[in-house]
Amino acid sequence: MVPRAKLVAANWKMNGSQPDNSRWLQAFRAAPPRCEAVVCPPFVYLQQVAAGLAGTAAGVGGQDVSDRALGAWTGEVAAEMLLDCGAAWVILGHSERRASFGHSDAIVAAKVERAVAAGLRPILCIGETLHQREQGLTMAVVAAQIDAVLQRVPAARLAGGAIAYEPVWAIGTGRTATPAEAQEVHAAIRGRIAAHDAPAAAATRLLYGGSVKPANAAELFSQPDIDGGLIGGASLVAADFLAICAAAAH
Ligand code: PGA
């Protein structure tokens, strides 16, 4: 099997300003990482980030995309627009959007379908809440989140993107899943995809997200089914993001 190249994605969430982004991009360009990297700023900064990363191997991604076709949908941003602004990737189904903006499994599936149809590479986020974990529902929750998407999009079409396992209780809390806990769920996710399409499962990068930082990245990334990370808070500091990328480049 061809080893899966590690992928590290920065999820800036609703952070940034033109001057701050500019400083971040300058630091990134001064020491570009050796692993594959993607930077996902708010929509309004996509072009600035795309221009700032030009000449590096890093990609650019959005943090969401509309499930609608171009037209009269006030406030929405279409997949074609992301591509037009230099994005090749898009984060979909992030738990903050699922929990606070009503993105159900069905809506997330529709967004993934729309994104891949337009040629974007999705980073599909899945993960259980603390309550669900305590109830022993982790595997059932992530399986349902995956199945909802695979009902609409063949696994082979997801393989060009990535799936990010982000336990909700680990996001922004400083509480990381242990490498063993994360590996266990990653292996189950790969198994679930393999039930649909084994070669696609072997090729799909599974990222871990949730309080990844320079100090814990290497151990997480050394797990057999952890193919990189989706980095929130630590991605806002260029040096920390680059240190996490360096942990993936080993
Ligand atoms: P965090 O966020 O690294 O700040 O925990 C990860 C994410 O939400 O993608």
Image (spheres, rainbow, N blue to C red):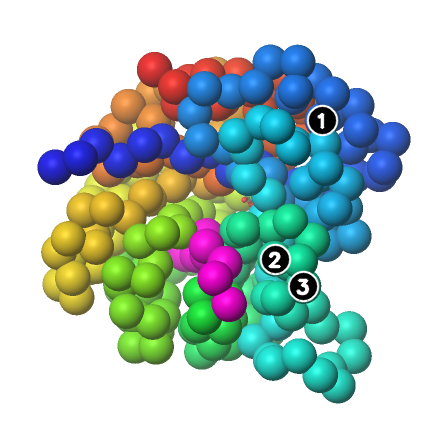
Type of amino acid under label 1: Leu
Q: Residue 125 in magenta?
A: yes
Ligand 1, by image quadrant, is top right
How far across and down, in percent of the image, does residue 12 sit? Answer: 66, 41
Query: Mark 3 Cα within 10 Å, few/some/many (few <14, many 20+)?
Result: some
Residue located farthest toward the front when viewing the structure as drawn: 55
The answer to whether residue 189 is visible is yes
The residue range painted magenta reads 118-127
Which residue shows up at 46% across the image and 56% down it? 122
Residue 179 sits in quarter: top left
Residue 25 - label: 1
Q: Residue 150's x, y, as percent?
A: 30, 70
Pointers 1 and 2 in contact (C-beta within 8 Å): no
Earlier residue among tags 1 and 2: 1
Q: Is residue 115 above or below residue 41?
A: below
Q: Determine the residue positioned at 41% across, 35% down.
A: 7
Specify the amino acid type for callout 3.
Met
Q: Of 108 and 84, which appears nearest the observer?
A: 84
Callout 3–callout 2 Cβ contact below 8 Å:
yes
Residue for point 52% across, 30% down: 57
Marking on residue 83: 2
Q: Position of residue 213 (x, y in %)?
A: 52, 24
Residue for badge 3: 81
Q: CA distance from mark 1 to mark 2?
A: 20 Å
Outermost residue to the right: 19
Res 167 seen here: no
Taking the view exactly as shown, the residue that stands out farthest to the bottom is 72
Does 58 sit above or below residue 118?
above
Classed neighbour count for the residue bearing mark 2: other residues with Cα under 10 Å, few (<14), some (14–19), many (≥20):
many
**Horizontal relation, residue 38 to residue 36: left or right:** right
Looking at mark 2, is its residue's CB closer than 8 Å to ligand 1?
A: no
Q: CA distance from mark 3 to mark 2?
A: 5 Å
